[in-house]
Image (cartoon, helix red, strand yellow):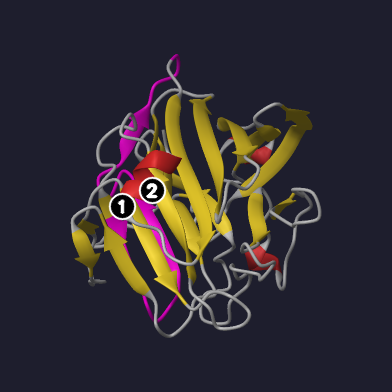
Amino acid sequence: MDGKDSICFYQKAPKSKDNPNIRCNYIYPLYGMDGNRLTEDFPEDHLHQRGIFWAWPRILINGGAVSDGWNLKNFQQQIVDIEFRKQKEGGVLKTVVDWKSPLWEEGKKACLKEETTILMFPKVGHYRRIDFEIKLKALTDRLTIGGSDDEKGYGGFSVRLHHPDNLKFRSEGGIAEPSAAAIKAGNYMNMSGSFLRNGGNGGVVIWCSPKNPEPFQSWILQKKENLQNAVYPGRQPVSIAFDEPLLLKYSLIVYDGEMTNRQIQNAMK
């Protein structure tokens, strides 16, 4: 909460509509500036998609697939520690999550440890900012993660929006159009439309830190299926070194009215 305003809810307890879709460790719902719910969970077209989440279709050890964290197949997340505290900048949520698979060590040991920090700032004028720092530490040698093995290469930080029919995408280069494959469009994406309860305009910005490993300017955008994905690493899997965690940073800006490129840049300073 920010005063009386709802910001978001972190899903700690496992949720499921049927056994293959058990999930936890994600944000749902995310609220707009007027309290409207902006995200979806268990959408009928893709039951595995969930609010704000970070997941990869291919988790491999020694080149063999052990989990699909995107579609929730052979994928188990155990939250081993969680802490929330207030500080001068805002509210800070820290989590430690073990990733397990029945196909590796019979699911008795974790193959990867995730440490995530979510910083929720108080609203400033007509917007609010939320920062995500996701640290992935391999607990075994030769662990890799990758996007889908197709032209989309989807995987990484994602938002399942309950978006309006007049949804528009804009990045620093101007209007962006959804495509069957990932597009290059700068390190942030502004999604605007009639997000407010009264039909008024608002939106959500996904910001990828320029300090993230390449690619950080690749996007899967959808108007029909409502999932927006900041693609990383894409179709080609990347290795997570045993002694060097993979660090990924993203931010969300939730706003009402309009937000220009200059305003987005200022909000992220």
The residue at 22%/54% (across/down) is: 185
Q: Which region is colored magenta? A: 219-243
Residue placed furthest toward the front: 125
Left or right of 219 on screen, residue 24? right
The residue at 54%/39% (across/down) is: 131
Q: Amino acid at mark 1?
A: Asn
Residue 134 versus residue 127: which sits nearer the camera? 127
Within 10 Å of disc 2 (Cα), the crowding (few <14, some 14-19, many 20+) is some
The residue at 43%/34% (across/down) is: 248
**Mark 2, secondary structure of its residue:** helix
The residue at 49%/51% (across/down) is: 253
Residue underneath mark 1: 261
Residue underneath mark 2: 264
Residue 176 shows in this picture:
yes
Point out residue 190 in the picture as x, y percentages from the top left corner.
Answer: 37, 60
Q: Amino acid at mark 2?
A: Ile
Looking at the rendered image, the quarter that the C terminus falls into is top left
Q: Is residue 229 above or below residue 18?
A: above
Residue contact between numbered discs 1 and 2, judged by CB atoms under 8 Å: yes
Point out residue 92 in the picture as x, y percentages from the top left corner.
Answer: 69, 33
Within 10 Å of disc 1 (Cα), the crowding (few <14, some 14-19, many 20+) is some
**Mark 1, secondary structure of its residue:** helix
